[in-house]
Amino acid sequence: MAMETDLTLKEPAVTGRGDKRGLWGIINKKIFVPPALLLVVAVLFGLLNPESFGKGASEALSFTLKYFGWFYTIGSTFLLGFCLWAGFSKYGDIKLGGPDAEPELSLFNWWAIAICAGIAIGIVFFGVSEPMSHYTTPAPFLGYEPKSLAAGEHAMRYAFFHWTFHTYGIYVSSAICIAFAFYNTRKPFKVSSSLYPLIGDRIKGNWGYFVDGLAIFAIVGGVGTSLGFGTMQIGGGMKFLWGIEPNNIVWLLIIGVLTLCYTISSYTGLQKGIRLLSENNIRLYFLLMAFVLFFGPTIHVLESTVTAVGDYLSNLVPMSFYLDPMGKSGWPGSWSNFYWAWWLAFAPIVGLFLVRLGYGRTIRQFVTVNLIGPAIFGMVWFGIFGSTSIYMEHFKNAGIAKVIAEHGNEVSLFALFQHFPMPSLTMILGMLAVAVSFITLADSMTSTIASMTTKGFGESREDKEPPAVMKIFWGIVMGLFSWVLLISGGASALQTSVIVCGLPILVLQIFMVAGYIRAMGNLKEYDKVNPPIRKSSLYEE
């Protein structure tokens, strides 16, 4: 198959400022219209008939968990294994962009953005509530008594499992495939470009449009989930602090403010918006962790975290494949498979965003900063907040579990902070962390979706930022979609929509990995940028 060395632009790229074609003129209609129509239909249906929307989503969830839980389990672990192979095999020396490519971000900026674009909103929401849940209601197949010493000691195992290596394995597997296709094979800045080694120039036709449209539809569901959880947590904090009862109007106001903030941040671009937000967000995380560690049971937290790391690593393989086939508790489906589907819904677009950060880096560096680094941070975060909350509950009778049971997971962080000095201040900082975490996530997603749906954008590295009007459109759509999910069933409807979106994405990612492996088998054909290892055995016949 003949391979193109250079791209020929059929449509002029746009910057969004001074372009005279108007919104409809700059839209890549074949990618934009199908997911946009589906989302509009979903929003209208949810507004007009929220009960039916929630019921339909629930039925889809039951079907997915019953028939495809095994597929999520195998697929997520396979993607993690692929990342480790790609980064630490001989192919890890490949440099994205070629020998002259220079990184645009420092390692700290890169790592901070990778965390904030990935798990940030989730770890703030679940940092206390998930370990507490594993302590008060341990998985049935483990055989631990609720709130026992054994349950407390092993509660962190599954929190680490759900929020560290598997999570970023799903993200980074997508990112590696797209990054090589964009920087080294010189294909457009789209998810579908990763399939070029498998289907060639058909990525420019209906197959490519379908893949990119599917990724856009899935990510809006994923962002809707995160914004919903963030809104619920901020609402919970407002009730804790000021007695404001969360309702549909309060949620709408919170979502409106967050949507305005992340849309403005996205408008300012990568270097000004998300970079500065991520830097300050990471500093806020470290401040909160240091505060809890210093004023909390410091030695217990350190001992518990170290023990939990060993417990997690020694049980990683059994946990990765366990589905409780005899007990049929449904626990792996309602916990682990929900998370894998959640991450999968984000994966193609998060991966596409991570591509923007990796220019001038090797695949090994890409895996280290985007997978290993965030996974370690996740362990530290859950180790500090999870161990502290369990200690307070077990040894101090803090009543955190009771507060969560009465008011929901969204108040868990604030229930912990009320047992520390300066509770009002720390709760406000906690709400700020939630807000900034979501803004950084939605900023990156808004910009990336706008890039994919803009005609002619992303055909070369010269295209830096998509049109502002496209960012604004997708920002509003994601905010509205999240509100509809909340009013039509809260967390249940959010969970359902994401799991359903994640299933086809998993199939897509397996094909993306297959394409990458094929490209590694014939680098002389697929690598167009003459990397520094051009003369090595990687490029020999």
Image: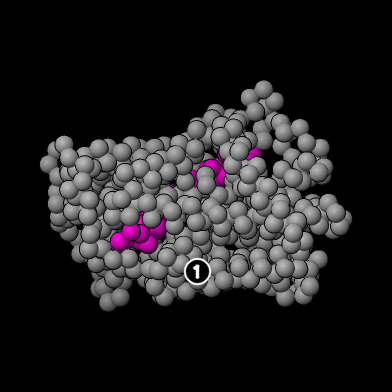
Residue at image position (23%, 59%) is: 99
- Quadrant in which the C terminus is drawn: top left
Q: Is residue 309 left or right of residue 534?
A: right
| Residue 6 visible, this angle | yes
Q: Is residue 256 left or right of residue 452?
A: right
Residue 409 placement: quadrant = bottom right
Image x and y of residue 478, in percent: 50, 59
The image's colour scheme reads one colour
> Was residue 532 drawn as part of the magenta stretch in this picture?
no
Image x and y of residue 229, in percent: 62, 57
Placement of 426 over or under 42, stated as above or below: below
Image x and y of residue 296, in percent: 76, 64
- Quadrant in which the N terminus is drawn: top left
Q: Is residue 163 left or right of residue 424?
A: left
Residue at image position (74%, 50%) is: 132
Count of all numbered marks drawn on residues in the image: 1
- Range shown magenta: 333-361
The crowd level at tag 1 (other Cα within 10 Å; few <14, some 14-19, many 20+) is: many
Residue at image position (52%, 67%) is: 439
> Was residue 354 drawn as part of the magenta stretch in this picture?
yes
Image x and y of residue 38, in percent: 44, 49
Placement of 382 over or under 314, stated as above or below: below
Magenta stretch: helix, strand or loop mostly: helix
| Residue 64 visible, this angle | no
Residue at image position (51%, 56%) is: 374
The residue that mark 1 highlights is 278
In front of the other: 389 or 272: 389
Placement of 80 over or under 118, stated as above or below: above
Assign a secondary structure to mark 1: helix
For badge 1, the amino acid type reads Ser
